[in-house]
Image (tube, rainbow, N blue to C red):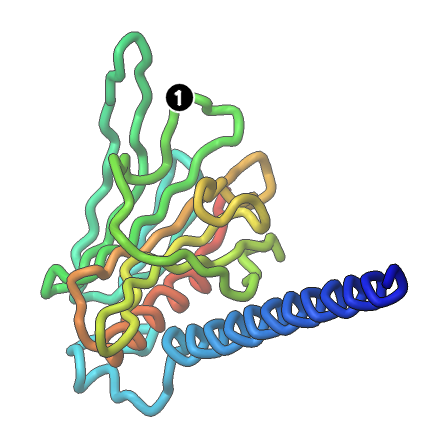
Amino acid sequence: MVIVLIAGGLFWYASIKEKQAQVEQEQVQASQRNQQQIKNDVQTTESVDATIATGIDMDVNHWQVYHNEQYGYEFKYPKTWTLKEVNELNIEGRNSFYERYVSIQSPDDTVYIEIGMKNANEDNVLNRVWRTGIPEGDFHRADAITLVANNPAEKRYLIYKTKDESLIQLVWLCKPGGDLTLNCDNFSLGEGKEGFIGMDGKWMTDTNQWHVAEKVLDMVVASISLKN
C-alpha cells in the first residue's frame, strides 16, 4: 500500500510539473508571437510614398536646421513642420524646476516630436514635457540604436490595442535597461551631456501614418550632432 501511495504521489508530482512546463512554454511562445507582431506593427516601410501621403519632403537635405547655442547641438526637421522652444519655470510646492526642450509638430497637429538636451549636473532642469499621467496601453522595448558619438539609446513604445489592431501612441528614446514601465532615464551623449527624445502620435489612427511619422523621427534623430 505504501509503495502504491508513493508511486501515485510521484505520478501526480510529475504530471503537475509537466503541465507547469507546458504552460510556461505556451507563455514564452505567446510572448514571442506578440514581440514579432510588435515588430511588424512598428517597422517603417519604404513602400509608402511619404511625400504623396503626408506632404513631407523626405529628402533631409531640404530640411531646416535647428541650432541650440545653450547646449551646443543641432538637428534637421521637415520644412513644413512647426518648431517651438520651451523654457518654462514650474513650481511644485517648495521645489522648482525648468522645463527645457524643443517640440516639432506636424502640419496637421497629429504628431509631436520632443527633443531635450541638458548638462548632466543640471538637477533643476527637466528636458522633456511634464506629464501628469500615461495613456492606456502596453509598454514594449525595441532594439537599441546608436546616437551621435556612438552613444546607445533604447527605443520604447506604448501600444494601445483596439478590437481590430494595435496602434502606437508614444515612442521614447531612453537610456538602455531599467524598468520598462517606470523609468525612461536620459541617454548619454558624452561630453557631460544627456538627452531625451519622445514622439506623441496618439491622435493618428492609420498604420501607414505611423510608418511615415516614425521614419521622420528616425531621420531627425540621425541628424543630431553636437556643436561647440
Q: Position of residue 26 (x, y in %)?
A: 57, 74
**Residue ranking furthest to the left:** 108
- Position of the N terminus, as image quadrant, is bottom right
The residue located at (62%, 57%) in the rendering is: 150
Q: Around disc 1, counting alpha carbons within 10 Å, would you say few (fewer than 14), some (14 to 19), or many (20 or more)?
A: few
Under circle 1, the secondary element is loop
Q: Position of residue 218 (x, y in %)?
A: 41, 67
Q: How many marks?
A: 1
Determine which residue is flagged by label 1. 124
Q: Is residue 120 above or below residue 96?
A: below
Q: Position of residue 94 (x, y in %)?
A: 30, 8
**Residue ranking furthest to the right:** 3
Viewed as shown, does residue 134 lie left or right of 3? Answer: left
Q: Nearer the viewer, residue 136 or 195?
A: 136
The residue located at (78%, 62%) in the rendering is: 9
Viewed as shown, does residue 53 lie left or right of 21? Answer: left
Q: Nearer the viewer, residue 44 or 37?
A: 37
Which quadrant holds residue 54? bottom left
Q: Position of residue 64 (x, y in %)?
A: 27, 62
The residue located at (28%, 45%) in the rendering is: 134
Q: Is residue 218 above or below residue 114?
A: below
**Residue ranking furthest to the front:** 1
Q: Nearer the viewer, residue 136 or 219?
A: 136
Q: Amino acid at mark 1?
A: Asn
The residue located at (37%, 87%) in the rendering is: 46
**Residue ranking furthest to the top:** 94
